Amino acid sequence: MPEQHHRPVRRPSSAFDNIVGAHDPAEETRVAHATASALLTRVRADESGVSADRLVAFTSEHGIDEIAELWSKAAPRTLPGALWRLYLLQLAIHGDPETSALLYERGRVELPSVDAAIAGAPVPANPDELVALIDTILRGAFRGDFAVALERAAAFCRIQASGATHLADDYESTEPGRASELTTRALRLSSYAQDLSAASTLWRSGTLS
């Protein structure tokens, strides 16, 4: 994942400071879990799907606001941690769909698994189709089966991680710096895949909070 996507878009922090104290990690954790649960419950309650569509469109255009920054500090295998990773994927793909498509297609070809079927991208997938896919997955988290959305995102990460690993091998002898960047990206994506898959299992058991 490109480094610029590892923190949300910064905005004036006065409202954020009023919500949570800068030196109260326990309160930050409490608010992170409460806001994630409230957002998921509220949007899923709108059966028309309008709220989910607005949320997906807003985050793709404006990034992640101060409340979601709390989620970045949550443990990976929690509800706010899972939502944070879904938004990071959306930001990364919207920010560089061409590279995302390159990694996805290379990974799809190289990875001997059913992950491509689980993720649900067209074959082959162009940049615009990958943008549409991640928006569909994010929308599904708020409208459909949350566990399925997490599994689709995990599969997507595994495919891209495979693509990044194989491209890193290609660049190793000619562009070691590029190879190192791709290796780091592959490790990060693999970590996301593990966390999202674990979160899916926890959601199904009713223990993701």
Image (cartoon, grey):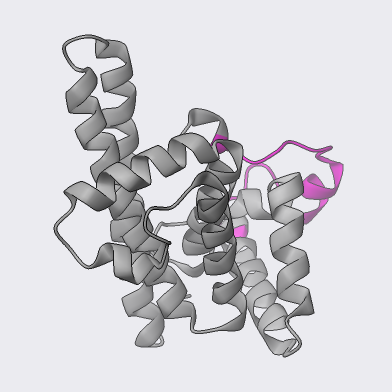
The image shows residue 137 at horizontal and vertical percentages of: 52, 67
Query: Residue at coordinates 25% horizontally, 30% vertically from top-left?
Result: 167
Corner quadrant of residue 205: bottom left
Circle count: 0
Query: Residue at coordinates 78% horizontally, 48% vertically from top-left?
Result: 16
The image shows residue 38 at horizontal and vertical percentages of: 68, 76
In front of the other: 181 or 129: 129
Residue 177 visible from this viewpoint? yes
Residue 65 visible from this viewpoint? no
Query: Residue at coordinates 75% horizontally, 47% vertically from top-left?
Result: 61
Magenta region includes residue 12: yes
Magenta region includes residue 24: yes
Give the residues drawn in magenta, as a range: 5-27
In front of the other: 199 or 105: 105
The image shows residue 53 at horizontal and vertical percentages of: 73, 70
The image shows residue 72, relative to residue 78, as above or below, that is above
